Structure formats: structure tokens, C-alpha cells
């Protein structure tokens, strides 16, 4: 069987075109990896810390409210200076510690979500450049997607961290509003109605 010179030329052109396509794929993949190079352990650690920083002020406010609620409840019942105070405040402290762990776990969840989103986008772009052989498109899309993935999202609210002492908090607030002169409540205040410091 004989092959014409034109057949040889077509095969050579096909090889050259495939080599060029593979070169573009390699260049596109390199561009994708470069644009996604900042998504490392430091990035995901920062995403976790961003959530912790966002959630901490609310957690601190809830902790102070829970302490206040316990103290008001004890004051109303005349048990402010009793072992019950230590017991109930210990409940609040345990809920605070559990809340701290919950915040850290939620931060890790946000970090893992970010990692998954980044890797899904990287994989999708690499699949695209393998299919199209368009390195310029791959580089542009990688730049755009990386830019959208970098900012931290709008984090969800914490919800209540102090379920066990929540009823005490509500009761304390109601007592303060409806009956500020209830027996024992005055023990929490100094002159001029200013709150007296009571711990953390």
C-alpha cells in the first residue's frame, strides 16, 4: 500500500496542531494554578479566623447577658450571696466554653467550604482548558473566579449560645423592666443607677 506525499503532509500538520494544542493546555493549566496559588493553608486558616472574629462580639454580649440574667434572678429571690450563685454562674461559664468550641467548629466548617469551592472551581477550569485548548480564556476565567472566591462570605448569625440560662436571662430582664425595686435587685447597683462590676 502506498501513501501519497499529501497524506504525509496532513499527518504532519495534525501532529503539529496537537502539539500546539497540548502546549496551550499546558500554558492554560499553569495560568490556572498561578491564579489559584494564594489559596493555601494560610488562606483557609484566615477564613476560619474571620468567622471567629465576626462571631466573638455577639458571643461576648450573650455571655454578659446570661451573667446579668442569673444575678438578677438570684437577687430577686434573695439568693445573691449563696452557693446557688456559684452553681448558676458555673452553668453560664460551661455554656460559654461550649460556645467557644461551637464557634471554632463553625469557623472550620467555613474554611472547609471555601476549600471545596476553590478545588471545584480549579477542577472545572482545568477540564475546560483540556476541552477547548484555549489558554487565554482559561487565564481570564481563573483570574475572575479567584477574585470572587477570596473575600469572606456573609457569615450566619450564632443563634443562642446560652440555652440553659436563657430563661433566667428573660426573667431577669422582665424583673428589671417591670419592678426595678424588687427585693435584692438594688444589690446589683451603685449610686446613680450605674451597674456594679461583677466579673468577666
Image (cartoon, grey):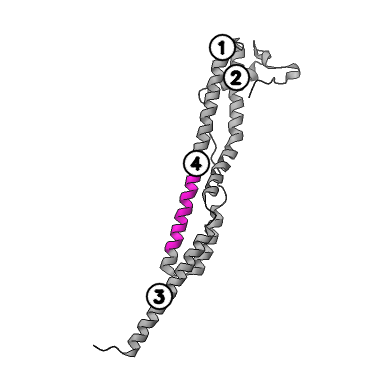
Q: Would you say the residues marked 4 and 2 are in contact, meaning their CB atoms lie under 8 Å apart?
A: no
Precedes in sequence: disc 1 or disc 4: 1
Precedes in sequence: disc 4 or disc 2: 4
Precedes in sequence: disc 2 or disc 3: 3
Q: Which residues are magenta?
A: 109-127
Q: Element type at marker 2?
A: helix
Q: Would you say the residues marked 1 and 2 are in contact, meaning their CB atoms lie under 8 Å apart?
A: no
Q: Element type at marker 4?
A: helix
Cα gap from disc 2 to disc 3, whole angstroms: 77 Å
Residue, x 59% and y 27% (percent of image)? 63
Q: Would you say the residues marked 3 and 4 are in contact, meaning their CB atoms lie under 8 Å apart?
A: no
* 113 relative position to 66: left or right: left
Q: Choose mark 1 or mark 2, whichever is in front.
A: 1
Residue under numbered circle 4: 108
Q: Quadrant of residue 55?
A: top right
Residue under numbered circle 1: 83
Q: Nearer the viewer, residue 187 or 5?
A: 5
Label drawn at residue 172: 2
Amino acid at each position: 500500500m502506498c501513501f501519497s506525499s499529501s497524506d504525509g503532509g496532513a499527518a504532519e500538520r495534525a501532529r503539529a496542531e496537537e502539539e500546539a494544542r497540548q502546549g496551550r493546555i499546558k500554558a492554560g493549566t499553569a495560568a490556572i494554578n498561578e491564579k489559584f496559588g494564594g489559596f493555601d493553608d494560610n488562606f483557609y486558616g484566615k477564613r476560619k479566623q474571620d468567622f471567629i472574629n465576626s462571631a466573638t462580639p455577639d458571643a461576648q454580649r450573650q455571655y454578659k447577658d446570661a451573667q446579668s440574667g442569673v444575678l438578677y434572678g438570684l437577687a430577686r429571690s434573695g439568693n445573691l450571696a449563696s452557693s446557688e450563685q456559684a452553681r448558676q454562674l458555673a452553668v453560664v461559664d460551661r455554656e460559654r466554653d461550649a460556645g467557644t468550641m461551637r464557634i471554632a467548629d463553625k469557623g472550620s466548617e467555613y474554611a472547609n467550604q471555601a476549600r471545596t469551592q476553590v478545588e471545584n472551581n480549579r477542577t472545572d477550569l482545568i477540564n475546560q482548558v483540556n476541552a477547548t485548548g484555549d489558554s487565554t480564556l482559561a487565564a481570564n476565567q481563573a483570574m475572575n473566579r479567584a477574585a470572587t472566591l477570596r473575600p469572606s462570605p456573609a457569615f450566619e448569625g450564632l443563634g443562642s449560645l446560652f440555652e440553659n440560662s436563657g430563661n433566667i436571662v428573660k426573667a431577669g430582664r422582665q424583673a428589671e423592666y417591670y419592678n426595678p425595686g424588687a427585693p435584692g435587685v438594688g444589690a446589683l447597683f451603685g449610686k446613680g443607677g450605674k451597674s456594679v462590676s461583677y466579673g468577666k
